[in-house]
């Protein structure tokens, strides 16, 4: 569980990210470190990045659903739109998991 102080600081940073405003480097470093070690902070950061990448997200639409459920990568440049062959599909499903994939908070 995030402390009130950490939660408020993370909300401030995420609000600035989602509005496309500048965030100072020290705050981004702090937010990234907290997001790696705390699941809730990571969700907050990913959601704000999705809103920043898609500011015209329609309420009740698929993008809104994906954001609310915290599904998918927030960076649209990492999205796959097509596969070249069966081996490409196989390799996509065999992606390496990050070191902390079993971590729970």
Image (cartoon, grey):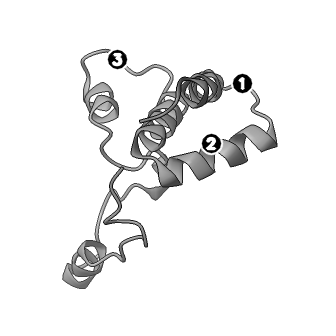
User: Is 35 left or right of 31, judged from the image as shown?
Assistant: left
Kind of element beneath mark 3: loop
- For marks 2 and 3, give the one nearer the viewer: 2
Q: Give how far apart the Cα atoms at labels 1 and 3 are.
A: 21 Å
Neighbourhood count class around disc 2 (C-alpha, 10 Å): few under 14, some 14–19, many 20 upward = many
Residue 72 drawn above or below residue 15: below
- For marks 1 and 2, give the one nearer the viewer: 2
Name the disc covering residue 31, or none.
2
Rendering coords of residue 50 (x, y %): 47, 35
Pick the residue in front: 19 or 27. Answer: 27
Residue 104 drawn above or below residue 69: below
Neighbourhood count class around disc 3 (C-alpha, 10 Å): few under 14, some 14–19, many 20 upward = few
* Disc 1 to disc 3: CB gap under 8 Å: no
Q: Give how far apart the Cα atoms at labels 2 and 3 are.
A: 27 Å
- Please report whichever mark, 1 or 3, sits nearer to the chain's N-terminal start: 1
Neighbourhood count class around disc 1 (C-alpha, 10 Å): few under 14, some 14–19, many 20 upward = few
- Please report whichever mark, 2 or 3, sits nearer to the chain's N-terminal start: 2
Kind of element beneath mark 2: helix
Pick the residue in front: 24 or 65. Answer: 24
What residue would you read off at disc 3? 58
Q: Give how far apart the Cα atoms at labels 1 and 2 are.
A: 15 Å
Pick the residue in front: 82 or 48. Answer: 48
- Please report whichever mark, 1 or 2, sits nearer to the chain's N-terminal start: 1
What residue would you read off at disc 1? 21
**What residue lies at 68% left-to-right and 45% top-to-bottom?**
30
**What residue lies at 40% left-to-right and 22% top-to-bottom?**
57
**What residue lies at 61% left-to-right and 25% top-to-bottom?**
5
Rendering coords of residue 78 (x, y %): 46, 57
């Amino acid at each position: 569980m995030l402390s009130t102080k950490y939660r408020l600081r993370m909300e401030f940073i995420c609000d600035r990210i989602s509005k496309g405003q500048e965030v100072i480097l020290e705050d981004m470093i702090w937010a990234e470190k907290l997001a790696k070690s705390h699941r809730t902070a990571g969700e907050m950061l990913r959601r704000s990045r999705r809103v920043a990448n898609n500011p015209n997200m329609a309420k009740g639409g698929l993008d809104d659903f994906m954001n609310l459920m915290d599904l998918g990568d927030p960076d649209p440049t990492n999205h796959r739109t097509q596969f070249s062959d069966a081996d490409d599909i196989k390799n996509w499903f065999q992606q390496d998991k990050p070191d902390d994939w079993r971590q729970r908070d």
